[in-house]
Structures are given as structure tokens and as C-alpha cells.
Amino acid sequence: MEDRMMKGRNETGRLLSSMLVAGLTILLGFTQLPAPLHAQVLGSINGTVTDETGAVVPGARVVLTDIGTGQVREAATSGEGFFEFPYLPPHQYSLTTSLKGFEEFKYSSLILEVGQHMTVNPTLRLGSVTQTVQVNSTPPSPSRQARCRSKLTHGESRTCL
């Protein structure tokens, strides 16, 4: 009877050893794949920022936001107006492009699929120029303005200080 128990334990041991070897072989086989599996899942968004005339816009700020997670990535366009966001998981994104002197441009819903390499080419329009003038002096007193006005006759001009 002891012989049968020993025989059963040996068979169980051999089975476990075989399973362990098979598991390690499979695991090591995955490390020998020609390309990483994540490269087939992740994608990218890139493009070239131009103005209304078609000229490239270097130094523009490009902000990519993952709508689902709220994660924000930022880039600046190169001297050729190019930007790139590599290694992106498939999600829904918004992309905002801005530069001083131009109106902000926004794509509110870019849907990146598994392994997709998306090209987006924003066009910036010139923004309106606003100017603020700050005066740091006190206007003349009303009585002095009245005196200057009252002395003016027939085409004379005076400066009251």
C-alpha cells in the first residue's frame, strides 16, 4: 500500500513540474514578441499649427485633455509648427491651441481609437488687439479749466498747465 502512495505522489510531483515548466515557457515566450503589446493598443495625436494664410505657427501652446480622466498634457509647437502627443490610450480628448495675438482654437471631442495615429491641424486666426492706457496724473481743477477757456478769443489757442 505504501508503494501505491509513493507512486501517486511521484505522479503528482511530475504533473506539477510539467505544469510549472509549461507556464514558464509561455511566460518567456511573451517576452520574445517582436513588438511590445502596448504599442498595438496606444495611439498618438499630432499635427501642424498654421495661421489663416497657411504659414506655420512656431511656439504655440497645445493642451491635450483626456475628457474621461481629466489628465492634461502640454506641448509647444516646433519651429515648423509641429506638435505630437505619443503613447495615448484610446479615449476621448479635447485639444486647445493658443498663442498671444491669436484667438484660441479648440477641438472639443477627438475620439482616439485603439492603435490610431490621428493628425489634427489647427488653424489660428488673428485676435483683436486691445490697448489699455493708464494715466497716472491728476486732471486740472475745474476752476483753472474755466479760466483758460474764458481767456480764449478769436482763434487763439492756449495750453493751461
Image: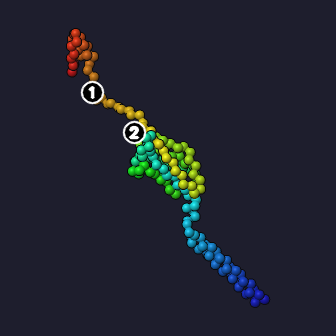
Whether residue 109 sits left or right of residue 137 in the image: it is: right
Q: Is residue 73 above or below residue 139?
A: below
Q: CA distance from mark 1 to mark 2?
A: 30 Å
What residue is rendered at 72% in x and 83% in y? 11
Q: Position of residue 141 (x, y in %)?
A: 26, 19
User: Quick one: label 2, few (<14), some, or many (20+) residues within 10 Å?
Assistant: few
Label 1, secondary structure: give it.
loop
Q: Position of residue 126 (x, y in %)?
A: 42, 37
Which sits earlier in the primary sequence, circle 1 or circle 2? 2
Q: Nearer the viewer, residue 40 or 9?
A: 40
Q: Nearer the viewer, residue 1 or 99?
A: 99
**Disc ID at residue 73:** none
Q: How is the image coloured?
A: rainbow
How many numbered discs, if any? 2
Q: Amino acid at mark 2?
A: Gly
Instruction: List the residue tagged with mark 2.
Output: 101
Q: Quadrant of the N terminus?
A: bottom right
**Disc ID at residue 137:** 1
Q: Single out the mark in the foreground, 1 or 2.
A: 2
What residue is rendered at 24% in x and 16% in y? 144
Label 2, secondary structure: give it.
loop
What residue is rendered at 58% in x and 59% in y? 41
Residue furthest top in the image: 154
